[in-house]
């Protein structure tokens, strides 16, 4: 039964429309957005969530949007007290604390898609790697030679290290703590594939790519864009221009929506082949 159905007798029809249709379940933590207008029904909302999702041990109320370098939102604990959890994804397990690190269940499908593109023996770099879901899913579902992650948030790096051990990928996956801008120039290697999963800032890191990606290699570039920009071909053109300006000739292989950002604005992943 949906949350709305469970709350039908507690909230008016108008109040029900205010309750965001979806909320996120990360392991045994629920993240819910309760607008101020229906805060008076907080107790009923908590009860409805617990009736529908019996395994839940903590409920977090979102306060504001994801922000800052570490891409974390503010939360208020409205039920329970434990904010660390284990989430399962494609046979992998990730320890995360959503109040301290970025992790989105909604990107699980995109991670699997990417992992399936990786061919045997590839050397892969994941910029902005968070607690390690892209590198670890790639290592578990495909046969790369190695996957290196770079991450700025020290707490995310700690979780990433725990997740490497938890998923037994020590021989394939490693993480370097720091800013991609400082770390990447120190890595003397040309990769077969580079992922740039930070749609709000990836653009300003393209200048670091020359000398780090092999000709014939792949780059997965993430960005936000309006539907109109995609449909008119402007997104493709701006991407080709951006890489060319930074000394990299690419062919756009695929443009795909992989998340919603705002009305008519989406997260896009653009798969690029270096030519
Ligand atoms: C949108 S999150 C993506 C995390 C991860 N790839 C995932 O899908 O769960 C972006 C991540 O980049 C990290 N970050 C932000 N700026 C960075 C930088 N300059 N260098 C390295 N990591 C950075 C943030 O701390 C955050 O964990």
Image: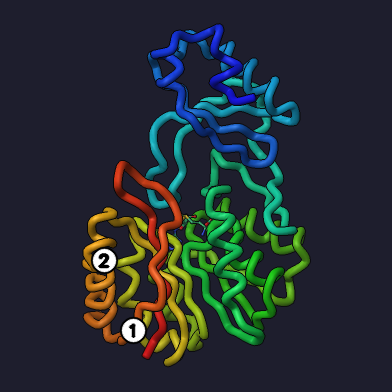
Name the residue rendered at 54%, 12% in the picture. Answer: 8
Q: Work out whether mark 2 precedes mark 1 in sequence or the reverse, and give the earlier one.
A: 2
Residues packed near mark 2 inside 10 Å, few (<14), some (14 to 19) or many (20 plus): many
* In the image, the residue with mark 2 has its CB under 8 Å from the nearest atom of ligand 1: no
Residue 98 placed where, x, y %? Answer: 56, 41
Q: Is residue 223 above or below residue 65?
A: below
Give the left or right position of residue 31, taking residue 203 as reference: right
Residues packed near mark 1 inside 10 Å, few (<14), some (14 to 19) or many (20 plus): many
Name the residue rendered at 69%, 79% in the picture. Answer: 143
Pointers 2 and 1 in contact (CB under 8 A)?
Answer: no
- Kind of element beneath mark 1: strand
Q: Nearer the viewer, residue 19 or 158?
A: 19
Quarter of the image where one finds residue 115: bottom right
Name the residue rendered at 52%, 85% in the picture. Answer: 192
Which colour style is shown?
A: rainbow
Residue under label 2: 235
Give the left or right position of residue 241, taking residue 184 as reference: left
Residue 11 placed where, x, y %? Answer: 49, 9
Name the residue rendered at 51%, 10% in the picture. Answer: 41
Give the left or right position of residue 71, taking residue 58 as reference: left
Quarter of the image where one finds residue 231: bottom left
Residue under label 1: 250
State the separation of the CA atoms marked 2 and 1.
14 Å
Q: Is residue 3 above or below residue 265?
A: above
Q: How many marks?
A: 2
Which quadrant is home to the N terminus? Answer: top right
């Amino acid at each position: 039964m949906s949350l709305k159905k469970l709350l039908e007798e507690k909230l008016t029809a108008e109040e029900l429309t205010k309750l965001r249709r979806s909320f996120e379940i990360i392991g045994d933590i629920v993240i819910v957005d309760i607008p101020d207008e229906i805060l008076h029904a907080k107790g009923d909302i908590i009860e409805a969530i617990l009736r529908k999702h019996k395994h839940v041990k903590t409920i977090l109320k979102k306060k504001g949007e994801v922000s800052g370098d570490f891409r974390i939102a503010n939360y208020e604990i409205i039920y329970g007290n434990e904010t660390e959890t284990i989430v399962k994804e494609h046979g992998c397990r990730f320890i995360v604390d959503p109040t301290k690190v970025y992790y989105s269940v909604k990107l699980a499908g995109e991670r699997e898609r990417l992992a399936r593109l990786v061919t045997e023996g590839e050397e892969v770099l994941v910029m902005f790697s968070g607690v390690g879901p892209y590198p670890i899913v790639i290592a578990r579902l495909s046969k790369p030679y190695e996957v290196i992650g770079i991450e700025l948030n020290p707490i995310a790096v700690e979780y990433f290290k725990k997740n490497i051990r938890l998923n037994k990928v020590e021989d394939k996956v490693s993480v370097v703590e720091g800013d991609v801008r400082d770390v990447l120039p120190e890595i003397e290697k040309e990769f077969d594939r580079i992922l740039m999963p930070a749609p709000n800032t990836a653009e300003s890191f393209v200048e670091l790519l020359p000398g780090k990606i092999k000709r014939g290699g792949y780059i997965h570039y993430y960005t936000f864009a309006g539907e109109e920009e995609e449909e008119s071909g402007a997104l493709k053109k701006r991407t080709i221009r951006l890489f060319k300006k930074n000394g990299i000739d690419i062919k756009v292989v695929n443009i795909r929506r992989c998340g919603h950002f705002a009305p008519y604005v989406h997260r896009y992943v653009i798969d690029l082949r270096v030519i």
